[in-house]
Image (cartoon, rainbow, N blue to C red):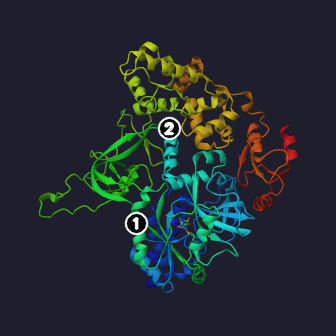
Amino acid sequence: MDLFSEIEEPEREELKRLRRELEEANYQYYVLNMPTLSDRDFDFKMHRLQELEAQFPDMYDPKSPTQHVGSDLGKKGFETVRHKYPMLSLANTYSREEIESWVRKLPANVEIVCELKFDGLSISLWYENGTLVRALTRGDGVQGDDVIDNIKTITSIPRHVVGTPSSFEMRGEVLLPWERFEALNKEREEQEEPLFANPRNAASGTLKLQDPKEVARRGLDAYLYYMLGEDLPGTTHFERLNTAKQWGFHISDAIKVCHNVDEVMAYIAYWDTERKNLPVATDGIVLKVNNLAQQEELGFTAKTPRWAIAYKFPAEKQLTLLKEITYQVGRTGVVTPVANLEPVQLSGTIVQRATLHNEDFIRSLDIRPGDHVWVEKGGEIIPKITGREERPTPDPSLKGGELDSAPDTLPFREGLGVGFPTVCPECGAKLVRVEGEAAWRCPNEAGCPPQIKGKIEHFVSRKAMNIDGLGEETIDLLYQKGLLHNIADIYDLQLGDIAAQERLGEKSAQNMLAGIEASKNVPWARVLFALGIRMVGETTAKKIARVYNTIDSLQQADAEQLCAVEDVGPQIAENIVKYFEDSRNLDIIARLRQAGLQFEGEAAEGPQSDKLAGMSIVISGTFAHHSRDEYKALIEAHGGKNVGSVSKKTSFILAGENMGPEKLKKAEALGIRLMTEDDFLEMIK
Ligand code: IVH
């Protein structure tokens, strides 16, 4: 190896590392809906990767993240369809200088349309002869998933239009309005389901649901901003959007034609403030060349148009003093480090507490009480710490190397009084950290106050046992008085005990007891959800209860059998098995049974047979006798599992008319049997 290649080596390593990091970030963002990198960090890394790839052309790789947009394909149950026109993303800019540099590359006296950059997920709507026929997600930019049934729940998207060309495409952004996002998260919090980090993730998770009714309930909205097709009206983008508005499409009013960078900057300055009053999330401005002929001339790079760019608003953040780190124990025992801050104004509210996520986060940024830290709110509900300022270096004139202006800062380490606690701050139990998880947990489920109270709050919540009159404060009070220690104690509460409490009285005691009595009729699926088995949310509980229609049959199931239930993976299965292994849980169940709760479902809800037990079955195509949903239910009722994609593990494919070509090809390649619906019905008869 000569000297030069040795010098180049670290940069080649950096290039490979960046490709891996960006690939992973794309997966986290598009597939898991759990972003790990901020947009800005992502852009900087992407930019650096582009630089390095230009420097080392021999390392060209068509699979590099610089060559394709991130992909959310692979969600089961949707048909993947090729886009007529690739769905590209936009290059991002962050400053006036970058905008000026873009404008310099455009023809002189160009008109620039400024629009809001909506922060949701892009959608491509195809209209044929005036009817909405497809609604594709961006996918990998080349092909997307058809989510038309979910899109049809959005009332602002017309299903039929008149006076339009016979075939055209509208692109836009699907969004969950702030109000709906907050309501959804509140509901999820009550049910101990993981919260969505921001409205974009919530919209993305919602659009990929297999249940259009639930999608409709959540209340998505959409704004359209781009028309494509042949023989379309108009010679400018602005005209086209106005035409689209007349056809009935939801087009934002905040669109302006600008003639120079000053006008663009004035638009940006106005909307950077005004956007806070909008019902939906925006994260920047999109600048587009207005004239369509000019657009065509400018064309595209591999990933983005040259005729449009995005300008991203700076995230709202503030620098403030970290006074102290405290630790909060959640309902499931997770211990979260909380930054107690010198109060600061952020997005219209005063922030004095922010999450520090977990121990690894604190260590990686070396955050210590006494530091000045950056706090951000962004789209997230809980403010978070995103960084810290450099500490002043010790003044050598002070003896002993003392820190001159930050005397409180000590490295974050156990044993120094500022490290992550080793025991639970609420109950003193030794904390545990499951391998592979970032969180420390208090394992003392039955004896740790926030966990005890949290379990009871979950049990009585609306979607579980729905016991009126037993709110958070009352639970706390009855817990303090020694009347409530677990969910079974609820059914031992006596009128006199409750009424004797100040703040409660006879009337509310009677209401509470009536609510407790009524809860005895709550159906088995909700009782199962109410038990609070980790990761068994409302929907999963319903699916389990449909297959296991008594608690006894569920208790006898092993992990492998449980995995045959839709939505139940190895982790949930293990949680269920463990739950029934704990004798304290069995005591509670025995007492609840004694109290008269429903531990059995309708016979029809249970498995009708185990003819398909252990089988993974793919459904593809259209059918004559039953709908796809009915076939899905039949598979589950006979102990099988319906899966979305064909793999080695697929037992057979229930194949209808017009089976998807990709699935067919894969089935042939793997030698997987296709079964007609008649044969299938015969099999389960
Ligand atoms: S135009 C070829 N206009 O931002 C250009 N995109 O970061 C097509 N977006 O993928 C996009 N608001 O999902 C355009 N007013 C707007 C937009 C917008 C939001 C999204 C879109 C795009 C992403 C790029």
Q: Quadrant of the C terminus?
A: top right
**Residue 222, x across and y down, in percent:** 58, 58
How many angstroms separate mark 1 from mark 2 (CA)?
38 Å
| Kind of residue at badge 1 | Tyr
In this rendering, position of residue 260 left or right of residue 171: left
The residue tagged 1 is: 270
| Kind of residue at badge 2 | Glu
Q: Residue furthest top?
A: 496
Give the mark, 1 or 2, whose residue is nearer the N terminus: 2
Q: Residues within 10 Å of mark 1 (few under 14, many from 20)?
A: few
Q: Is residue 211 visible?
A: no
Mark in the foreground, 1 or 2: 1
- Number of marks: 2
Ligand 1 quadrant?
Answer: bottom right
Q: Residues within 10 Å of mark 2 (few under 14, many from 20)?
A: some
SS assignment at label 1: helix
**Residue 503, x across and y down, in percent:** 37, 22
**Residue 147, x across and y down, in percent:** 67, 56
Along the viewing direction, whichever of 14 and 375 lies nearer the viewer: 375
The residue tagged 2 is: 190
The quadrant holding residue 32 is: bottom right
SS assignment at label 2: helix
**Residue 102, x across and y down, in percent:** 47, 80
| In the rendered image, the vertical position of residue 127 relative to residue 13, given as above or below | above
Along the viewing direction, whichever of 42 and 103 lies nearer the viewer: 103
Q: Is residue 541 visible?
A: yes
Along the viewing direction, whichever of 286 and 470 lies nearer the viewer: 286
Residue plotted at (70% across, 76% down): 231
Q: Which mark is residue 666?
A: none
In this rendering, position of residue 338 left or right of residue 291: left
Residue plotted at (57% across, 18% down): 595
